[in-house]
Image: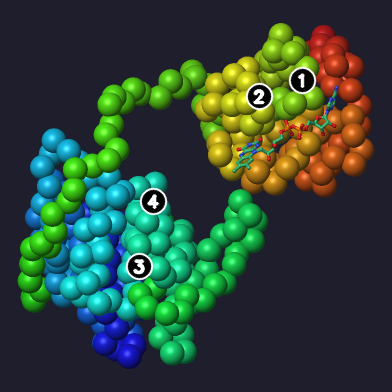
Amino acid sequence: MTDTAKILIFAEGADTLAELLTAGRALGGAAGGRVTAVAIGPNAAALAQDCLTRGADEAMVMQTADAAPPGAEEFALALREAVQVKDPDTILIGATRMGNDVVARLAQALEVPCASNCMTLRRVQDGDLEIERRVFGGRFTATQLLSGRPQVASVPPSRFPKAEPVQEVRGSIRELAVTLPPPRVRIQATSPRVRSAVDVTKAEVIVAAGRGVKKVEDLALLDALAGALGGVLAGSRPLTGDVDWLPTDRRVGLSGQTVKPNLYIACGISGQIEHIVGMKGARTVVTINNDPKAPIHAETDYSVIGDLYEVVPAFLQALERAKRA
Ligand SMILES: Cc1cc2nc3c(=O)[nH]c(=O)nc-3n(C[C@H](O)[C@H](O)[C@H](O)COP(=O)(O)OP(=O)(O)OC[C@H]3O[C@@H](n4cnc5c(N)ncnc54)[C@H](O)[C@@H]3O)c2cc1C
């Protein structure tokens, strides 16, 4: 079955669609299988044409009006129609924020399992799909097997090279005949995200505040330490979301920023995995925590077991003395 595998690919943008074409071809076996690209939206015709010039066997097109751009629900409905027509073995979807929403909705509607954010894809015995994906905030890689048909998976953008244009375009375009119901979710307004002036991802020195900080005013103490070291202040999630003591874009961790400073000083942070994944690239990590059993100590180069309200002023005094010497 591998040489004749039928692959359906879908992404909102041309680049990711061209990457999925490469991934789909590889899954099709030695003969490349049959890869059908699905293009939906106001620019569907151009997307479809691009896929054909890169060697897709077919492109299914659903043009929509600019005025009401499709949402995940509409994409999933249209893809269901494409699945009915093509009866694919595997469906690959670009793992954008929208794509991961679509992949879950589609798999649920088809009552098949799905895997999101797949880093590798491999056809194995009986035509099953073996995939690798990162789990637990990227700490581990899980190998999973999708059996049954169709297999539904999403693939992050830039994971595969884009399919190159072919010399001879052989594929054809087919209209996707589906009438979408009026969208049940309407975007009423959008507003730009408010960003702080500081980009923590570029900082060489970061002092990060956690729930060990008792009051918002006390952040001034850590800010002074950051300033003395030419660094910036960041925080764990409780301080950057549960309470708004620091802007969200200063959050370090899974749902925040990934930082790689030369020096990371974690103050009153326990070291949960969701925080660690954001700062494990730091060259040197110093921890100030009054609990000797806090997990963060396992991640640090230098641990100070103590009260940050005593340790940080002592640090500042030592820095002052060092400057004067
Ligand atoms: C889906 C998901 C995404 C998440 N994303 C993120 C993320 O991006 N970033 C993130 O940080 N978290 C994230 N979290 C939350 C995460 O699980 C933890 O709840 C959070 O990191 C804990 O923050 P903390 O270490 O500041 O607080 P706590 O876990 O409460 O730790 C506070 C620490 O301070 C110490 N302490 C208390 N008083 C003092 C003192 N006076 N001096 C010194 N030490 C003191 C305590 O011993 C304790 O170890 C996420 C969670 C989920 C479920």
Q: Which residue is depicted at the point 59% across and 26% down?
A: 241
Q: Give the number of the disc on residue 176.
A: none
At which x and y percent is residue 19?
30, 62
Secondary structure beneath disc 1?
loop
Q: Nearer the viewer, mark 2 or mark 4?
A: 4
Q: Mark 3 sits on what residue?
A: 110
Q: Name the residue under label 4.
A: 101
Q: How far apart are labels 2 and 4 at the CA level? A: 28 Å
Residue 268 higher or lower than 282, as above or below: above
Ligand 1's quadrant: top right
Name the amino acid type tagged 2.
Answer: Leu
Amino acid carrying mark 3 in the image: Leu
Residue carrying label 1: 213
Q: Earlier in the sequence, mark 2 or mark 4?
A: 4
- Image: 321 above or below 138: above
Determine the CA span between mark 2 and mark 3: 41 Å
Distance from the alpha carbon under mark 3 to that under mark 4: 14 Å
Mark closest to the chain's N terminus, 2 or 3: 3
Q: Where is residue 172 in the image (x, y as percent from the top left)?
A: 7, 71
Q: Name the residue under label 2.
A: 239
Callout 2–callout 3 Cβ contact below 8 Å: no
Q: Assess mark 1: CB under 8 A from ligand 1?
A: yes
Q: In which quarter of the image is residue 152?
A: bottom left
Q: How far apart are marks 3 and 1 (CA)?
A: 49 Å
At 13% from the left edge and 54% from the top edge, which residue is drawn? 179
